[in-house]
Amino acid sequence: MWQCPQFIFLIMGIVIIFSSLAIYAIGNRYINDPYQVSLIVIFFTLILFVLAAILSKSFEKLAEANRMKSEFVSVVSHQLRSPLSNLKWAIGLLLSGRVDKVSGKQLEYFKILKENSNRMEELVSDLLVVSRIEQGKLLTRVEEISLGDMIRDLIRRLDVFIKASNVKIVFSEEKNLPKLLADISQIKLIIENLLDNAIRYGKEKGRIEISLRKEDRSLRFGIKDEGLGIPLEDQQYIFQKFFRSSNALRYKTEGSGLGLYIVKSIIDKMGGKINFNSQEGKGSTFWFTLPIPR
C-alpha cells in the first residue's frame, strides 16, 4: 500500500483537509476579518495540494522505474537460463569423454568452466526469485511439511560439500514437533541459504549447530557457526539486496549478496520472523520462527 502512488495521494489529501481545518481554526482565532481567513486557508491549501501532486507524481515515476527494473531482471534472467543450460550440457558431455578423450590442462580448464557455469546458474536463479518476490509473483503451493525431516535430508544431500569444507554439523530437535503448512520449495530455499552460508563462511574444522524446537505457537529454527562473524557496522544492512559484509568480501569473492534478502522476504511473507546475533571473528547465530497452523 505504501508503494502505491494513489494511496500516498489519498493520505496527502487527508493531511490537506486536516491542515486546512487547523489553519482556519487558528486564523479565525487571531484574525477578525473572515475574508482574510478564507484567503489564507485557500492559499495554504493550494500550496499543500501542489506539493501533494508533485510528491505523488515523483512516487509514481519511482514505482514505474522499479517495475521496469524488476521486469528487465526477470526477462534477462529467463533469457540467460537457456544458453547456460546448453553450456552446462556441452561441458558435461566433453568431461564425460564420450566425444573425445580429455586430459591434462584441457580437463583442468573444463572443470573451471563447469564450476563457473554452476555459479552463473545460481546467480540467475537468485535473480529470478528476487524478481518474483518484488512483483508479488512468487507462487505458493501449501502442503504439510516435517521441518525436521527436511533438515536431515538437506544435510545428507550436502554431505560432499560439508566434508570438503571440513566442518561438523550437529542437529538437535525436540520430539513430537507439529508439522508446518507451507510451500516446500520455499522452506528448502530458506534452509539451504542459511546452511550454505554457515558452511561457506564457517571455520575449518569448526562446528555448526542446528536446532529445531517449539516456541509458543511457532517453530523455531536456529543455526550457529564458528566462522567469520559479521562486523558491527555491517549488521544493519545484512538483509539488503546485493549486500555482503566487508570481511566476507575479503575472505571469499564469490556470492551475490541475495541469499539473506530472499530468506527474509519469504519468511516475512509467511508471517514469520528472522533475526541474528554475530560477533566478528567468533561466528554468527541466525534463527527464524514460523507460525504453526491451528
Image: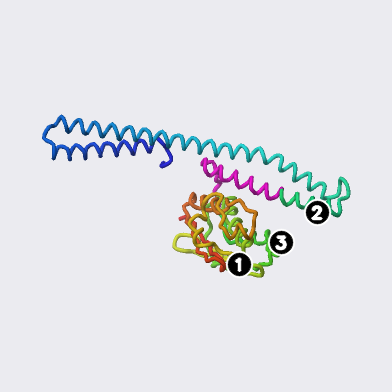
The answer to which of 202 and 175 lies nearer the viewer is 202
The amino acid pointed to by label 1 is Ile
Q: CA distance from mark 1 to mark 2?
A: 32 Å
Res 292 seen here: no
Q: x%, y% of residue 45?
A: 26, 33
Q: Tag 2's secondary structure?
A: helix
Q: x%, y% of residue 241?
A: 54, 49
Res 137 seen here: yes
Q: Tag 1's secondary structure?
A: strand
Q: Which mark is residue 160?
A: 3
- Tell me the magenta residue range: 117-143
The answer to which of 194 and 238 lies nearer the viewer is 238
Q: CA distance from mark 3 to mark 1?
A: 15 Å
Which residue is at a point 64% across and 48% down the rendered structure image? 123
Say which label, 3 or 1, has the lower sequence index.
Answer: 3
10 Å neighbourhood of mark 3: few (<14), some, or many (≥20)? Answer: few
From the image, tell me which residue sits under label 2. 108
Looking at the rendering, in which quadrant would you find the N terminus? Answer: top left
The amino acid pointed to by label 2 is Glu
Is 233 magenta? The answer is no
Q: x%, y% of residue 52?
A: 34, 35
Q: x%, y% of residue 187?
A: 57, 53
Q: Which mark is residue 208?
A: 1
